Amino acid sequence: MSTRTSQHRLGGIALVCALVLLVAGLCAFAQPAAAAGATGPAAAATATPSGVKAAVKGATMNVRGGPGTTFPVIASAKKGQSFDVQGKTKDGAWLQLCCFSGKPGWASASLVTVTGDLKKVPVPEGLPNPPPAAKPAAKAGGKPAGVLLYSVLNRDADRWELWEYNFATAKSRFLKEWRTEVAFAPDYKQVVYYAWPGAVGGKNGLYAANPDLSGERLIIPGGAYPSFAPSGGRLSAQGGNSMYILNSDGSGLRKLEVGEYPDWSPVDDWIAHRGCYGPDCGLWITHADSGERRRLTTGGGDGQPAWSPDGKQIAYISKEDGNFEIYKINRDGSGKVRLTDTPQSDGLPIWSPDGKWIAFRSDRSGKWAICVMRSDGSGVAQVVEADVLPLWFWEKMAWRP
């Protein structure tokens, strides 16, 4: 397993630049098939009097049956495709594009580059009302419990720090500097994390310790994003763009598969992760021993999967509609539900030990913080500010009772 370098995981300007390169690589996803009605890089669409065009900016773009995220997805388009703009909403936030299987569709204006004068594009009469968002009613009473471990960027000291938040006292506490990417063992009697070079005499890598971080010991040099098997005897981890399996004492290291953000099921030997295999990008589950792989999602921007404690659902992030939001899905790929809906970024979900809550990082308040919500997406509340770099994708958290 390759060892991380200062280019990949050091603070300050060098870290920002290195992570820009890293994420650029991670986000170079293969493209889906062209939307119906499109030929080549540019979509062949019926010309409109306005002459206004919209070109897809990102890797993929969802096209919906109406102007809003509660309308169903009717098609997808890929980067570089261009469509005629036939209509718009009054505020210009959504554009009606032509055409997908002979019918117009709607896309968020933030996902396209427009050429031409949008003022010439009409607002269609009789715009459909959006269907109600499918979100269960909030459950009365109850509060999250336990202790959450999370990393914080201390900009004054130019370093990462590991902290804990106690839900019972509503207080946070500093633990150690230069420790990040945490995971608890199934019995919560030890924690594994990444320790940076300056904190461990240059011997950076994955370390194990007692819950209070005493008794720190090196498991293996390098590595990232650790996750325990339900037996506690094995770990999954990431090295470069590949996933590895190893014993919890560092022995028996072997490569499992190309992939990112591995998270081991708490009930069996399936590992959820992101991956691209030929043109097929999205979330997958791969068996730790047989290597059998099953597809869960098709989104090129899907990542950071986190199993529910009962192993029946997976929370994850997706850029399905332009910015990172949190979704959950059943382990067989059915029942996808969007849990957050803000113009800002939400990510790095982690379930509470009882499965009733999900903690996540968000900059919805204008500052990066940790929030919690019920597992149905209701009852969102900020619990503590926790700064991160603009590219925050590796700062996973851990939750114990």
Image: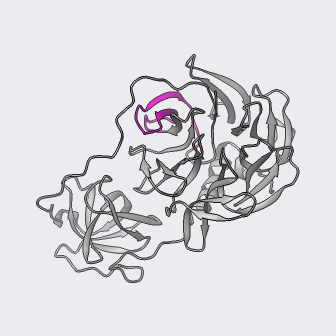
Could you tell whether 170 is left or right of 117 in the image? right
Name the quadrant of the N terminus. bottom right
Query: The magenta stretch spans which residues?
Result: 363-389
At which x and y percent is residue 328?
A: 48, 48
- Residue at screen point 43% across, 38% down: 364
At which x and y percent is residue 227?
A: 71, 45
Count of all numbered marks drawn on residues in the image: 0
Answer yes or no: is residue 195 visible.
Answer: no
Q: Is residue 384 magenta?
A: yes
Q: Nearer the viewer, residue 43 or 168?
A: 168
Q: Quadrant of residue 173?
A: top right
Q: Is residue 110 magenta?
A: no
- Residue at screen point 42% across, 73% down: 80
Could you tell whether 89 is left or right of 12 in the image? left
Residue lying at the far top of the rendered structure? 169
Name the quadrant of the C terminus. top right
Q: Nearer the viewer, residue 272 or 270?
A: 270
- Residue at screen point 47% across, 45% down: 345
Residue lying at the far left of the rendered structure? 125
Q: How is the image coloured?
A: one colour
Answer yes or no: is residue 253 visible.
Answer: yes
Q: Nearer the viewer, residue 173 or 22?
A: 173
Q: Quadrant of residue 244?
A: bottom right
Q: In this rendering, is residue 170 above or below 87?
A: above
- Residue at screen point 57% across, 42% down: 308
Q: In this rendering, is residue 85 above or below 347?
A: below
Q: Nearer the viewer, residue 169 or 329?
A: 329
Could you tell whether 72 is left or right of 247 in the image? left
At which x and y percent is residue 325?
A: 45, 48
